[in-house]
Image (cartoon, coloured by chain):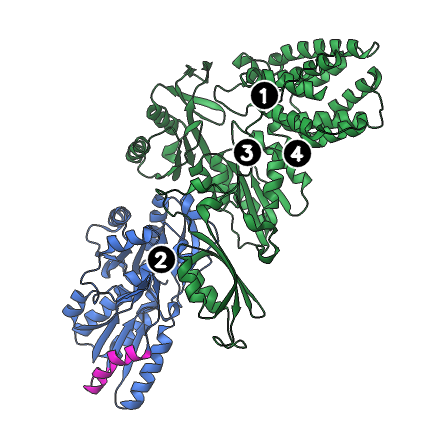
Chain colours: A blue, B green
Amino acid sequence: MTFFSDTDCDITPKECAEYGIKMIIMPYTVGEKVIYPYIDFEKFDAHSFYDMLRGGTMPTTSAMSEEAYIQHFEPEFQAGNDILYVHFSSATSNTFNIMGQAVDKLLAKYPGRKFYHIDTLGITALSYNIVLECADMYKAGKTAEEIVEWAKVEVPKFSMYFFADDLKFFRRSGRVSGLAATMGGLIGIRPIIYLNDEGKMVSIGKEKGRAKAIARLVQYVEELGEDVKAHRVLIGHTDCPDIVAETVKMLKEKFGDDLNVIVNDVNPTIGSHCGPDAIGICFHAKHR
Amino acid sequence: MLRQGAVALGKEKTAVNDLNVFPIPDGDTGDNMYMTIKAGCTALEGHLGTLSELSAAASSGMLLGARGNSGVILSRIFAGLSKGLQGVVVADTKAFAEAMQSAVAEAYKSIPVPVEGTIITVLREGAAGADASGDLNRYFDTLLQAMQVSLDHTPELLAVLKDAGVVDSGGAGLLCIFRGMNEALCGEVSDEELVPTSAPSTPAVELDKFDENSTLEFGYCTEFLLRLMRAKVDLETFDEQVIIDYLNQVGESVVAFREGTIVKVHVHTFTPGVVLNEMQKYGEFLTIKIENMSLQHHQETNQNNASFKKPKQKYGVVTVASGEGLVNSFREIGADEVIAGGQTMNPSTQDFVEAFKRINAQHILVFPNNKNIKMSAEQAASLYDKAEIHVMPSNTIGEGYYGIGFIDRDNPDVDEVIANVTELMESVTTGMVSTAIRDAEGEGVTVHTGDFVGYCDKKILTDSIYRSEAAKTLCERVGAASRDVMLVFYGKDVPAEEAEKLVADLKATYKNLEIMLNNGEQPVYDYIFVLC
């Protein structure tokens, strides 16, 4: 069985090599130029990328072609391998409709093969956390069926809450529901957003000032968390190390220094929709 | 007579301005009253007619020209006079005295809570003390005497006047006007020109606003009519959403709709050429208009251009600010019209009416940002019927900025929107740092001319010879430590480095306070701190 993930899940080439994961690259477009992460650059320079967004550049993202999916998957089926693909939320992109068509064609061509997929119902740190859990099991020799069974119970238990300084990116992407049409970001009022059970982004309230917004994220971890310390706590951010440092400090004060916190840069494709200075915490919870 | 009143006030307006209670240039009463009465004179120019016609014309001119609270009240006084003079051919003492009573009634009616010790007291006591049993000269002599006595007593009625050691400025202005009218009555008409005032008028396109060193900050307002071409698209199935989606990627403020095979488009973009090329994939252009928005600003040119009228919005926003940075900030946060003005230059009723006309919205929310501007806004609201005007209780720049930023334009319930905005504004505190223009005593603070003073809610909280020192103490006094967000607008006299240094220091002091620095470039106020 071959394990696939994608760059929208924040997994890096280094980890892919460690775990033996094959990566699907999700492109983004700056001006006229289509950019493929880790093909067009070796290491993601988050600071330069998000600074470019601060400067007013608005990258766009697009779905992949059927042909691109076939190029990824067909060699595995040809070689007699089944596929397990752990991917970002299908509710946030129509790329998965196109993938579905590609997979249907391939399964018809290779009737003996199996295609398993796990929808993390999330993006960035949320997907990343689930991919790492699945990768641990894969490394421990679990079968695709076992991992898929685990995911049915566990995916709804990985929760992510986040906020952003500048809402124009979210507003432009139109992918967050319940977001009031105010210019709250300019006056320091930040909507708190979470990913719901369907993998959609929903605004569930607002906080005045960064300090309160961070405190509210941490409060969710405390109140909603379940076996928090038995899992990784992922902090995804778009070039705001100061806010991250404050958040990590607060988390460790509440949960102890041995809390397994991993900080990662939100990938540029998803980052194009969040904008700079956004932060989210993904943790294991009672429910989302 | 009216003209001579204006001339007299024109001479004295600086003296009247100096009677302001606050040691900061603030709501210059003399200027406001002068511009108001001047608007009345302008309305009379070239007019010949009966006394009632003339007084009606003057009063309606003043109604539109009214600036500041004192100006609005003055316009009401003359509206009352005019009402009293209706049908009168030659005003004798009796007729004039009765008209004065009508003026008193109208003035009191115009203020929700009349405060004694102000212009209305001087008018009322003057009218009551005037002797109407003799001729008009006798009436005016006694009227002026009674007004002077009343004016001298204003400090006894109003503690703020007493504390500041001045008489009421509005009352003093009114006395000037009536003195001038008396001179005219006695035949002492001067030929003096009325002083031109720096009323904010709508400038023509100023090409200098974008020079070889400018950066393209706003992009281009790009409008065109695109004829969808049969050779390029399937006219039956073509969905203009494709165009809208594209425009949303490359621009902002997108408005696009289709009528038959014509698509009307409005977009703000930095690369109009790219947009036009893309659009040619679908059709050919009927008309194209591209304007650099740095030059556009006040020039919402296409208002009367029927071929392209902005679609009616649910909400429009009008506010008042001065300083280029502050004006831009207000636009950025959602104000459709920013009327030039503020503390030292109160916009007129007409300025508001003109701003309303430039907006096509069902509801227009007005943020006057100053108590002294509110009445002009309200008067304008009563004169305008093309939209529902809501004058919001924003008394400071900070309240206005926060209020506008919190308007949820997707919420169809206007009452709820207003309630939410009002509630937020109530939680906002605005502190300001300015230079003292004279010595004064604050609450436990001694103010020296030329010092930097920090104040909030008309209370002077600190005085220092150092600007940053005054700013820091002010932040402390207004309770920055218990707040979550503070916006800082620095004025045109403050170097950017100084403001940045101050903010760095404040950030170090208030760890949990999020501080956002903006270059307001505003006059008068070196710093405006907005806490929420």
Q: Are marks 1 and 2 on the same chain?
A: no
Q: Is residue B154 left or right of residue A277?
A: right
- Residue located beneath label 3 in the image: B200
- Residue located beneath label 4 in the image: B64
Figure label count: 4
Amino acid under label 4?
A: Leu
Of labels 4 and 3, the one closer to you: 3
Q: Chain of mark 2?
A: A
The image shows residue A36 at horizontal and vertical percentages of 25, 67
Q: Is residue B117 visible?
A: no
A71 magenta-colored = yes
- Residue located beneath label 1 in the image: B30
The stretch in magenta equals: A66-82
Q: Chain of mark 1?
A: B
Structural crowding at the residue carrying mark 4, measured as other residues with C-alpha within 10 Å and reported as few (<14), some (14–19) or many (≥20): many
B460 magenta-colored = no
- Residue located beneath label 2 in the image: A58
The image shows residue B318 at horizontal and vertical percentages of 55, 42
Amino acid under label 1?
A: Gly
Amino acid under label 2?
A: Met
A137, above or below B366, in the image:
below
The CA span between labels 4 and 3 is 14 Å
The CA span between labels 3 and 1 is 17 Å
